[in-house]
Every structure is written in structure tokens, then in C-alpha cells.
Image (cartoon, rainbow, N blue to C red):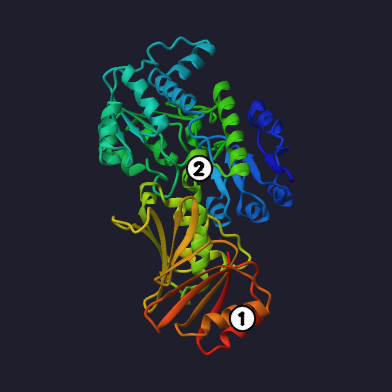
Amino acid sequence: MAKHKILVADSISEKGIDDLKNDPDIDVDVKFGLSEDELVACAAEYSGIIVRSATKITERVIEAATNLKAVGRAGVGVDNIDIPAATKHGVIVMNTPAGNTISTAEHAFSLMTSMARTIPQAHASVVAGRWDRKKYEGVELYKKTLAVLGMGRIGSEFAKRALAFGMRVVAYDPYLAASQAKILRVELCETIDEAIAQADFITMHMPKNDETHHMINAERIALMKPGVRIVNCARGGLIDEVALHAGIESGQVAGAALDVYETEPPAEDNPLLKNENVVLTPHLGASTQEAQENVGIEIAHTVRDAVLNGTVVNSINTPNIDEKTIEEIGPYLNLAEVLGKLISHIAPQQPDFFRINYCGKVSDVDTTLITRSALKGFLQTSSGEAVVNTLNAPSFAENRGIRVTESRIPAPCEFTDLIEVETGNDSETTTVAGTFFGNQPRIVKIRDRSVEATPEGHLLMLENLDSPGVVGHVGKTLGEHEVNIASMSLSRNKIGGRALSVLNLDSAPSDKLLADLEAHEGIHEAKAISL
């Protein structure tokens, strides 16, 4: 079997690179400083790419990387990776949010204490031969109010250190539960404005997106206490740097400590560079020996596992799935994909909804990936040359105007487990369902008819009259074409009414065979389905 190739495009821990090189199923290329054109030229070779912040994984690179399964970012921020393009092309994007948690929290806290006591400025004055004791009078942290904007891993670690210094901590995070805030011993605020209005110090630990861009601006600075001090070790662009400089010049803001900037490195004419009340470091939050070692090893293992066995952790654009989860829901994933593929062959034209219903034990697990697997099977036949997988299937459906939903069917359930897939539009709906007999998957419903068929290989589905001679014609015609029947399931709505027959065949039926079957007046439709 051919080895998977992984490109390490930015510098990471040598231990991480060595772990990849020692894997017999992986070939590793280490190439730093590649331009976009150079990446585009070689991208198709790789199943995985590892970057830090320097290399840009653009839409052009992703489109050229036809074999790419995963991009790993050694660090937290993924601003240098085109997430929508990756999602569209079914590429998993993963980062290492935990590897530099302590390093970044410690650096941010160090910046706060340095700013409070004007340590960098005082150091510079002593080195310059001055002794400005009165000029560099600082403030204590004790009994001051700290606002933490973003209580993820780093924000929580920062809060712990602030509490140890005797600070009162208020926090804003729309995803932090009140119970968790109580455990962390912080006061939870409903809005950013409520948090910053009472703060002597503000520290920021939120991602950069449309909602958080310039979240600290002139309007919010005006709401703050006079003499507030602001720390940002998260992402550049969270603070409007022009507004921050103006706030410092006016005295509304006593000082700021920044490790990240809107443009990195900052432009020479950035007024913050010459402002004595600002402490600046060159994006050092993750720059400790321990953090670099941790994130390098972690991202190497993360990308390797995603490429080799589909294990997904710390993903930005798809649900996480570890080996235990794969073991638990793996059979459901396969059955759901087959049901999606089956219903795609019999669905009404121009469906506008896709619904998957769960009943029995399967209702108790996280069904996100199961639903995506069914959707993947459904869309594969209509996607043209595009590759549909569990990552990009929802966006494919959205682009086609298909509304995707899932639900739980309340007990009692006819089967121990049941996965039912429905699709259609206002005028017509089609349903299929599957379950397990022991460990063996079975199709148990097609078009609301009870059947029993093995969900693999070649299926022949017939809509026919429930009348004498039809089954004989089917057997005779298949025999004439030398196609063997492995199993057969018959279902009718009433005696002499319309029947549905599902046959598992040993080989695919030809178009001529289907035409010969439909030549019988009792057979309304003969459809071949390969699963």
C-alpha cells in the first residue's frame, strides 16, 4: 500500500517531525518558506500539511491539493488557513488549543504585571543612566477588578492567577454556563459593556471573527473607567489600535500591553510603537520551550491520525471523532451512508428536504456524524466530479437548497435500532429505513413497504402488480441473462394490489435485462441499484 505523504511547511518541534518519520505508513517532507505558487505546484502530493502562522493555506493551494485530507496548525489561530475553502473541498482543519495554554496565560499575566508596575519603561531608564523613581510609580493588582473577555482555556488560567493575586474577576463569555462560572469563582456578565465598565484591567482571550473584530473601539473605550489598562495576547484586530492610541493620549486608558497586532510586524508609523504607556512584545504568547515542544508533537500526531485512520480531534470545521467514538458508531455510519445512497436512486426529482429519524439505542449517541454519513451517500450520485464527504456534505446540501434535519422517534420502537431516511418535496416523499439483525445490517423499509434486504452489492427493485406469473417472469428473465438471485423480499399493500420486490443479485443487471423485465405488463418499474 502506498504511503501517505505529509508536508511540514513551518518549523515545529523536532520530536514531532521524528515521530512522523518513524511511522512506517508516512513519508515526510520538511520544506520551510514555500511561496503560494510553490505550494500550489506540489500540493497534490500530500495527504496532510502542517503549518504554523507563516505559511498561508489559501483557496488556490486547497484546490490544487486534490489528495489533501487534513491541515494542522501548530497553535491556536487559523487565520492563515482558508476555512471555507477547506470545508468546501472536504479538508479537515485542526489546531492545538491546549498545547500553549499555560504559556500564553503566563505571558499575558506577565504583561499585565509589567504594565501595572511600568517595568519595561523603568528598565530602559536605568539602562539609559537615569534614576526615575517618581516617574514610574505603578499600581497594585490587589483588590482591583479584572474583566476577562473569553473564558476558554487561556482565559480560565489567567483568571486563576488573578484570583491568587487577590483580584476580583468578572467575565464575559456567551458560552460559559453560570454553574461553571461559579466553579471558576468569577462573576459572569451578560454583555461586554457590563464587564468593561467596572474593570481596572481588561484581558482578551477571544477568537477573531466578524463579531469580535474591533470589539474594543472608541465607543467601548468611552464606557470604561478612566485609567483602565488593557492586555491583548489573543488575536490582532480585536482592538482598534487607532482608538486605543487616542484613548491613551486622552488619559482614558492608562496603559496597554500587546503581544498581537492588526498587522504583524506593526508598521513603522504605528503610533503605539512610540507611546510610553504601552508594553509591546513580538507575538511571544506561545514562545516557550515547553509550548513549542507540546504543540509540535500534538499537531504531528493529530494530522497523522486523521490521515491514517480518520480520527479527528480539535477540528475547526467538523465534529471531533476519536477511536472510541469510531468503534461505537462505526456500524451506524456505514448503514446510514448506504441508506442515503439507496434513497438517492428512488428520490423524487428536485428534493428540498432531507430528514433522518432515529429510534432505539442509536437515539442515545451523538448522531451528528451518522446524519452526515447518510447525507454523503445521498449526495454522491449528484455531485458530479466533486468529492462529497462527511465534512462538506452539509454545504453541498445547502447550496442545492436542501434543508437537512434530524429527529428522535419516541419509544416504543419496532426494532432495537432503526435509522429512517426521508427525502422529497411538497408533492412527494420517499422513505427508506435500516436496522441490525444481530450484527448484520438490513434494509427493512423502502417507500413505506416492509422488506428485508442486505444493504450491499447489487440490488434489483421492482414495482409490480401482485398477480400470478410476475415472479415467474422475473426468475425466468434473470436466468436467461445468467444473473443469479442471492435473496428476494416481496411486499404488497393488499392482495392483487401493488407489490414491491427487492432482490440481492450476484452481478449487476444490464440495461437489456431491465428492459426485458419491464416488457411484462405486470411490472411497472425495474431499477438497478449498486451499493
Tell me if mark 1 has few (under 14), some (14-19) or many (20+) residues whose alpha carbon lies within 10 angstroms of its own: few
Q: Residue at x 56, y 47 (%)?
A: 92
Amino acid type shown at disc 2:
Glu
Q: Indicate whether 17 appears above or below 163.
A: below
Q: Which one is in front, 92 or 479?
A: 479
Q: Quadrant of the N terminus?
A: top right
Q: Is residue 18 left or right of residue 201?
A: right
Q: Position of residue 169 (x, y in %)?
A: 29, 27
Q: Position of residue 463 (x, y in %)?
A: 48, 80
Q: Which one is in front, 114 or 424?
A: 424
Q: Indicate whether 120 appears above or below 271.
A: above
- Mark 2 and mark 1 lie on one chain; the one further toward the N terminus is 2
Q: Position of residue 255 (x, y in %)?
A: 39, 28
Q: Residue at x 46, y 9 (%)?
A: 131
Q: Is residue 413 left or right of residue 528?
A: left
Q: Disc 2 designates what residue?
A: 327
Q: Which one is in front, 524 or 102?
A: 524
Q: Quadrant of the C terminus?
A: bottom right
Tell me if mark 2 has few (under 14), some (14-19) or many (20+) residues whose alpha carbon lies within 10 angstroms of its own: few
Please say whether residue 100 is visible from this viewpoint.
yes
Q: Are marks 2 and 1 in contact (CB under 8 Å)?
A: no
Q: Disc 1 designates what residue?
A: 476
Q: Position of residue 195 (x, y in %)?
A: 28, 35
Q: Indicate whether 296 appears above or below 132.
A: below
Mark 2 element type: helix
Question: In terms of image quadrants, where is residue 357?
Answer: bottom left
